[in-house]
Image (cartoon, rainbow, N blue to C red):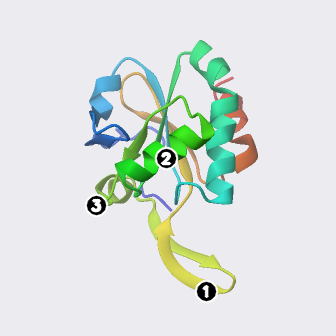
Amino acid sequence: MSSLKEGDKAPNFTAKDQDGNIVSLSDYKGKTVILYFYPQDDTPTCTKEACNFRDNYQSLVSKGLTVIGVSFDTEKKHQKFIKKYNLPFPLIADTDKKIIESYGVWGEKTLFGRNYMGTLRTTFIIDKNGLIKHIINKVDSGNASQQVLDLLQ
């Protein structure tokens, strides 16, 4: 679980998106950002979460929200994932896990009784001033966008 707290300044980052464009959190100053971390492209739960953000993308944008996904997958994997599911938002290729680690979302997980290290599915809502407004640690993949909207009511 992240050591970051609501009210903390969100760690800035600079990395490449699926198209090799350089993206920094500071590029979004003045906007509310939904920065969601997920384990891996094209796995069932991650696909469900990405498609939920896709299906509700217009209502999120109409409320002034920007969606950005982050995983340690490569730009090429992100491109395939975006194309396959027609995702309208950028995915950051954090292949060296610098962003994942700066947000404290790399940790121990359990699957089928086996412990391993991986990305903890977490969503950060970052306000227009770059402060963390909300942290969702228990993400409901099929309802991720509604979880965000409920917090911003």
Residue 53 place in picture, x, y as percent: 63, 35
Mark 2 neighbour density, 10 Å: few (under 14) some (14–19) many (20 or more): some
Please name the residue that numbered disc 1 is placed on: 114
Dot 1: within a 10 Å radius of its alpha carbon, few (fewer than 14), some, or many (20 or more) residues? few
| Amino acid under disc 3 | Asp
| Residue 65 drawn above or below residue 85 | above
Q: Secondary structure at mark 1?
A: strand
Q: In the rendered image, which residue does mark 3 sit on? A: 96
In the rendered image, the vertical position of residue 63 relative to residue 147, given as above or below: above
Tell me which amino acid carries mark 1. Answer: Arg
Q: Name which residue lies at 32% across and 33% down.
A: 25
The residue closer to the viewer here, 43 or 28, is 43
Could you tell me which residue is drawn at 41 percent across and 57 percent down? 73
Chain-order first, disc 2 or disc 1: 2
Is disc 3 placed on a helix, strand or loop?
loop
Q: State the separation of the CA atoms marked 2 and 3.
A: 20 Å
Q: Are marks 2 and 3 in contact (CB under 8 Å)?
A: no
Q: Where does residue 64 sit, x and y in percent of width and height?
A: 53, 16
- Residue at 64% x, 50% y is 47
Q: What is the x, y in percent for residue 10? A: 36, 40
Among the two numbered marks 1 and 3 on one chain, the one whose residue lies closer to the N terminus: 3
For residue 90, side relative to residue 58 (left or right): left
Q: Marks 1 and 3, how far apart in space?
A: 24 Å
Amino acid type, residue under disc 2 in the picture: Lys
Of badges 2 and 3, the one in the foreground is: 2
Which numbered disc, 2 or 3, marks the residue that appears first in the sequence?
2
Q: Nearer the viewer, residue 74 or 92?
A: 74
In the figure, is residue 63 to the left or right of 125? right
In the rendered image, is residue 129 in sight? Answer: yes
Residue at the farthest top position: 62
